[in-house]
Image (cartoon, rainbow, N blue to C red):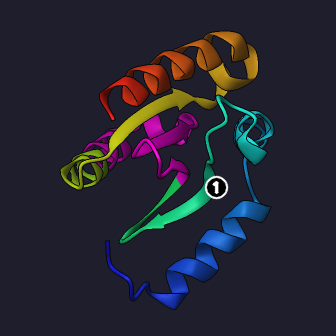
Amino acid sequence: MNNKLDPQLLIFAKSMRHTATDGENLMWQFLRNKRFMNLKFRRQHVIAPYIVDFFCHELGLVVELDGGQHGTDDAVEYDAERTLFIEALGLKVVRYWNHDVLGNTEVVLEDLWRVCSELKVSK
């Protein structure tokens, strides 16, 4: 990873922490302070040139929460390119819809538990 991060990216990531979606805020309640499987997650973490919603360094796991704007053709294409870039760094990317985090929280957390368990075994 690049040790010299763009200061503007860091400032933007910090501002995003204060303008999180309802889904991101709820997910953060489960992930913060090693509450989830005793794993440390970071929020709005810079993986240049991108900012990811949540990142677990120990597992090399990126968790992205997508709202309705991610359903457009341009956004789908951008997200696919972004995922390829991040996966090329040897990281795993999982995506959940904001409305699922809010409305099917248990299902999302069960899936994330499964993903994390599989990654722990392979590390």
- Please state the horizontal and vertical placement of residue 44, each as a whole percent of the image: 60, 59
Decide whether residue 55 is among the magenta residues. Answer: yes
Residue type (three-letter) at the residue carrying disc 1: Arg
Above or below residue 105? Residue 95 is below
Decide whether residue 42 is among the magenta residues. Answer: no
The answer to whether 83 appears left or right of 71 in the picture is: left
Q: Dividing the picture into quarters, in which one does residue 13 lie?
A: bottom right
- Please state the horizontal and vertical placement of residue 48, each as a whole percent of the image: 37, 71
Total marks placed:
1
* The residue stretch that appears in magenta: 53-80
- The structure residue drawn at horizontal position 68% and vertical position 72%, both measured from the top left corner, is 14
- The structure residue drawn at horizontal position 75% and vertical position 45%, both measured from the top left corner, is 32
- Please state the horizontal and vertical placement of residue 62, each as a whole percent of the image: 45, 44
Quadrant the N terminus occupies: bottom left
- The structure residue drawn at horizontal position 48% and vertical position 27%, both measured from the top left corner, is 116
The answer to whether 110 appears left or right of 121 in the picture is: right
Q: Name the foreground residue: 57 vs 89.
A: 57
Disc 1 designates what residue?
43
Q: Secondary structure at mark 1?
A: strand
Q: Dividing the picture into quarters, in which one does residue 31 lie?
A: top right
- The structure residue drawn at horizontal position 76% and vertical position 35%, both measured from the top left corner, is 35
Quadrant the C terminus occupies: top left
Q: Name the foreground residue: 91 vs 14.
A: 91
- Please state the horizontal and vertical placement of residue 40, each as a whole percent of the image: 63, 47
Q: Name the foreground residue: 61 vs 12.
A: 61
The answer to whether 35 appears left or right of 3 in the picture is: right
